[in-house]
Image (cartoon, grey):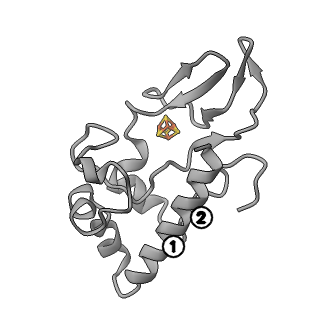
Amino acid sequence: MGYISWFKEHAKKHKELMRRLEALSDDEVIEYFRFENMLEKEPDFCPLYKKNKKCHDIENLNCYLCACPNFRFNDDGLGLKDGLVLKSYCSIDSKDGKQFKGKSAIHQNCSACSVPHSEDYIKEHFDRDWLKIMKSVPIGFEV
Ligand code: SF4
């Protein structure tokens, strides 16, 4: 699955879940998105929930801003870097982000970065419309 298919699919799931959580306050919504609660109540929201696995091994993991507003991607590539096609990068160049070099492409590797998963960060960037927060993520694609 390319980035854009995942992105569109996740946007749909997020929207549908937010419709069901309409009666909750913003703070309650953020609490609802805590990993432990999502695992129990929304097993279909993320494929990792069924395996009881976290994408990042951190305490207090919150899934509201999965993926991350700082992620940038284009499945067709964003230019060449070291002779490879750059498919994604981090717009804030997070100190915990890395780049994964494959045979023909470079991808951003966020596995050690917890920036979008803390509740302080989520509160600062909160909007009930996930796509509004993520509008800059897909490069060259109107959301
Ligand atoms: S490295 Fe961190 S801040 Fe950068 S895109 Fe990945 S999760 Fe977001």
Ligand 1: does it lie within 8 Å of the C-beta at label 1?
no
- Contact? badges 1 and 2 (CB < 8 Å): yes
What residue would you read off at disc 1? 15
* Helix, strand or loop under label 2: helix
Question: Relative to 20, does residue 33 appear above or below in the rendering?
Answer: above
x and y, in percent, of residue 95 in the image: 46, 26
- Quarter of the figure with the N terminus: top right
Residue at 33% x, 56% y is 119
Can residue 139 be seen in this snapshot? yes
Using the image, tell me which numbered label, if any, was put on residue 107: none
Q: Quadrant of the C terminus?
A: bottom right
Q: Quadrant of residue 77?
A: top right
The amino acid type, in three-letter code, at marker 2 is Leu
Left-right relation of 33 to 103: left
Extreme residue toward the top, this view: 82
> Which is more foreground, mark 1 or mark 2?
1
On screen, residue 12 versus residue 80, left or right, reads left
The answer to whether 141 appears left or right of 111 in the picture is right
Distance CA(mark 1)–CA(mark 2): 9 Å
- Amino acid bearing label 1: Lys
Q: Residue at x 61, y 65 (%)?
A: 132
Percent x, y of residue 37: 22, 64
**Residue 93 at x, y = what percent?**
56, 30
Please tell me which residue lies in front, 93 or 85. Answer: 85
Judging by the rendered image, the residue that carries numbered circle 2 is 131
Crowd around label 2: few <14 · some 14–19 · many ≥20 (10 Å):
some
* 82 vs 114, nearest the viewer: 82
Instruction: Determine crowd level at label 1: few under 14, some 14-19, many 20+ residues with C-alpha closer than 10 A.
Output: some
Q: How many marks?
A: 2
Q: Using the image as rendered, state which of residue 133 and residue 142 is in the foreground.
A: 142
